[in-house]
Amino acid sequence: MHPGRTQDQKRAFVREATKVAVETLACPPESLEIIITEISKDSWATAGKLKSDS
């Protein structure tokens, strides 16, 4: 994800992603790990173009 999300947004994402994974995969929440990696647009490219050039 690109930088700029608030801690509250990240908390909500982690909470909801965990909830869906537990329901879908029938696994305990303790077995899940979510890693949020923020990558700047000048270090991310799609279709041969940097996101920062878009």
Image (spheres, rainbow, N blue to C red):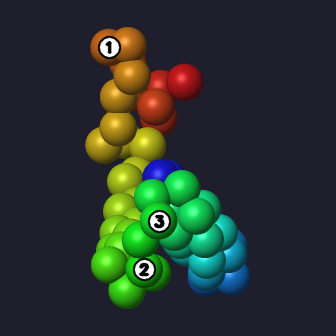
Marks 2 and 1, how far apart at CA = 40 Å
Would residue 17 be visible to someone looking at this image? no
Marks 3 and 1, how far apart at CA = 39 Å
Tell whether label 1 touches label 2 (CB within 8 Å). no
Q: Is residue 19 left or right of residue 3?
A: right
Residue position for label 1: 48
Q: Amino acid at mark 1?
A: Gly
Residue position for label 3: 26
Q: Which of disc 1 and disc 2 is earlier in sequence? A: 2
Q: Amino acid at mark 2?
A: Pro
Around disc 1, counting alpha carbons within 10 Å, would you say few (fewer than 14), some (14 to 19), or many (20 or more)? few
Identify which residue is drawn at 45% across, 81% down: 29
Quarter holding residue 4: bottom right
Q: Position of residue 30 (x, y in %)?
A: 37, 86
Q: Position of residue 45 (x, y in %)?
A: 35, 28
User: Which of 15 and 37 lies nearest the eye of the viewer?
Assistant: 15
User: Which of 54 and 22 lies nearest the eye of the viewer?
Assistant: 22
Q: Is residue 35 above or below residue 11?
A: above
Tell whether label 2 touches label 3 (CB within 8 Å). no
Identify which residue is drawn at 43% across, 43% down: 41
Tell whether label 1 touches label 3 (CB within 8 Å). no
Q: Position of residue 10 (x, y in %)?
A: 59, 74
Q: Is residue 31 left or right of residue 22?
A: left
Residue position for label 2: 28
Q: Nearer the viewer, mark 3 or mark 1?
A: 3
Q: Secondary structure at mark 3?
A: loop
Quarter holding residue 13: bottom right
Q: Position of residue 6 (x, y in %)?
A: 65, 76
